[in-house]
Amino acid sequence: MDTSFTDKTVVVTGASKGIGLAVAAAFAAEGAHVVAGARTVTAELAALSGVTAVPVDLSTSDGPAALVATAVETYGGVDVLVNNVGASEPAASVIDFTDEQWHRIFDITLYSAVRATRAAIPAMKGRDNASIVTVSSLNAKLPAAFVAPYSAAKAALTNYSKVVSESYAADGIRANVVSPGLVRTPMWTAPGGFGEIVGGPSGATPDEVLDTILPEAMSVATGRVSEPAEVADLVLFLASGRARNITGADFVIDGGTLKSI
C-alpha cells in the first residue's frame, strides 16, 4: 500500500494493545512519527521502533490534550489523529449498569475522542491531507443490552465524527469512522475478558469462542473474526492520500455480520 506517511506525525490513543497497538505499528512501518498514548505503556508498545509512547490517562479532562501537546512540541504539528481508546464493561441487564459505569465508559470511549479532536484540530490546520480516523464499533449499529453504555458511547462517537467532518472539510481536515465487528483483541482473549464470560457456561476457551461459537451465533459470513492488523490496514487507507475525497464515512469491517443495507 502506497500510503506516503514518511515524516508525517500520527497521534494514536489507546495504543497499548489490540487495535491501537496494531495501528501504531502499521503507521510506524510506513515511516510516520507516531505518538502513542496509553494509561499503561506495555512492553509491546515500548518495543515499537519509530513510536513515542506516552503514559497518559485519556479518560481525564486534560489527558488527551497532553498527548496531542507532546506531538506538537516534538514534531511541530499533527497530520493524523486516530481516536481508538475505548472501554466496555458487562452487566446482567441494561438496568444493572450504575451511574459510575456509564460515566466511566463515556469518559474513556466518547469524551476522550472529543477532547483529543478539540486539541488536535488547531495543530492539523494547514497540513496536507490532515485526517482524523475514529474507531467506533459495530455495536453502534447493533446495540447489545449487556454492554449498553459501550454501544451508546460508540453510537455517539460515530455521530460526533460526522459533525467534525462537516465542520472542518473547508480547512482540509477529513474525518472518518472505522466500525469493527468482532476482533481478536485482549478484550476477548485476556483472563477475565469477554471470551471467558461468553464461554463460561459451556467451558469453552476464549479462542473457541472467537473461532467457532460467536462466528456461528452472529452469522459472520466469512466465518471468522477480524485481526487487529486488518483493522489497522483500513485505518491507514482512510488516512492516506488514496482517500483524499473520503470524509464523513463509516466503514464497517465485520466479516459480513451486519445484514442491513
Image: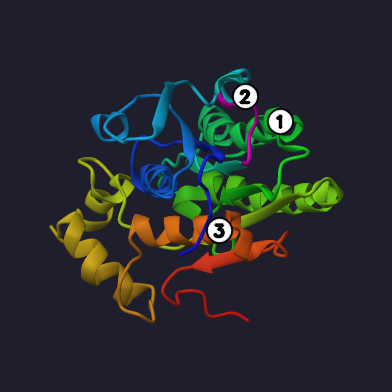
Residues tagged 1 and 3 counted as in contact (Cβ below 8 A): no
Badge 2: residue crowd in 10 Å (few <14, some 14–19, many ≥20): some
Amino acid marked by disc 1: Ala
Residues tagged 2 and 1 counted as in contact (Cβ below 8 A): yes
Q: Which residues are magenta?
A: 75-79
The secondary structure type at the circle numbered 1 is helix
Amino acid marked by disc 2: Val
Residue 225 is inside the magenta segment: no
Q: Quadrant of the N terminus?
A: bottom left
Question: Residue 186: percent from the left, percent from the top?
Answer: 29, 45
The secondary structure type at the circle numbered 3 is strand
Labels 3 and 2: the sequence-earlier one = 2
The secondary structure type at the circle numbered 2 is helix
Labels 1 and 3: the sequence-earlier one = 1
Question: Residue 227: percent from the left, percent from the top?
Answer: 33, 60
Q: Which residue is mark 2?
A: 72
Image position of 61 (left or right of 197): right
Labels 2 and 1: the sequence-earlier one = 2
Q: Residue at x 31, y 72 (%)?
A: 215
Q: Which mark is residue 123?
A: 1
Q: State the residue in front, 198 or 224.
A: 224
Amino acid marked by disc 3: Val
Q: Gap between marks 3 and 2, in whole Å? A: 25 Å
Q: Which residue is mark 3?
A: 178
Badge 1: residue crowd in 10 Å (few <14, some 14–19, many ≥20): some
Question: Residue 173: percent from the left, percent from the top?
Answer: 75, 47
